[in-house]
Amino acid sequence: MSRSTPQRLGLSLFALALGVLTPAACNKPQPTTTPEVEPSTSGSTESKKPAPTDAGHGGRLYDKWYAEIGGEPGFAPGERGGPHGDGTLDDGNGQPMAHDGHSYRLKNLFGWDLRGAEGIYGPEYQNKSYVLPVNLMTDERTPDELMAWIRDGGDGMPAYGAVLDETQLRELVTFIDDMRSGRVPRADQVWALSKDAPKNYTLLEGGDAARGTELVKSSCASCHGPDGRWIPIDDKYSLGAYSRAKAYESWIKIVSGQPNTPMHREIEFTDGADGAQQVLDILAALCDRGTFPGLDGQEDVPNGDPRCGAYLK
């Protein structure tokens, strides 16, 4: 296949609806180090799945766990799977939890910034009705206490223990704890909340667009192409156009990857601050509409759009 023009290669960086990228499509090596997983405390004697093979697995579970664990027939909210076989989870009291299309993804419960109602999904910003009042970045639960809450449910949290095993639950909690402890990038190191900007965020200052362009070449171009147009995202965005419009989502994909695809963590970093700088550099670079144009005939952010701020070209 020639890559001189934009091609649809399968699942985009962000949209599951387009299929699945194959390793051959990107030829990008994937992490092979198995992270250390704490022993189960549940007392279950059931066999466990192998530990995840990359550090972003917990982030992808946070994003869309039922896509990440994959398999057929699998779990489809409101349709199939789960303890009742109909795509519902329990509410922590053994009762099916009402499903409104948003209830079962943790990113919906806490937002792309993990700050719950205090963050971008809260009433002061995007005002999502399903967001919970807990800010995971300041929550004082220990990892074990947090794992018990996610496993057993209650206070608006579905009981995920019916669909995720102990290894998956531990990886999910490790992702949250790593973020709040500064071992992986946090949203507030990349973008700021805004009541006035579209989508209620603006990128922080301090990004190095030139360095970001090099990072895009080394981390993104093998799948998305040198100008980010090989894979249409949601059937209407290039990589650049999507990141200019929705960096409040795309930042975490760079950190953790896209559920149930070969796209895993796209950068290597020593700590959260180092990783956040790389993410900000990449997003600053993608604000260049000339180097990373939108798809033909599709809308892009206008001149002066505050989301990219001074990075916008």
Image (cartoon, rainbow, N blue to C red):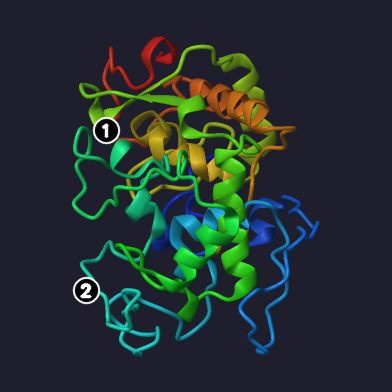
Instruction: Inspect this view and state whether residue 3 appears.
Output: no
Label pair 2/1, CB-CB below 8 angstroms:
no
User: Callout 1: helix, strand or loop?
Assistant: helix
Residue type at mark 2: give it. Ala
Q: Could you say which is closer to the camera, residue 269 or residue 84? A: 84
Gap between marks 2 and 1, in whole Å? 27 Å
**Would residue 20 be found to the left or right of residue 244 on screen?**
right
Image point 58% across, 55% down: which residue? 143
Q: Which numbered disc covers residue 199?
A: 1
Of callouts 2 and 1, the N-terminal one = 2
Image point 72% across, 34% down: which residue? 269
Query: For mark 2, what is the residue?
Result: 98
Residue type at mark 1: give it. Lys
Location of residue 264 with respect to 218 vertically, above or below: below
Residue 151: x and y in percent read 48, 71
Q: Which numbered disc covers residue 305?
A: none
Q: Quadrant of the N terminus?
A: bottom right
Circle nearer the viewer, 2 or 1? 2
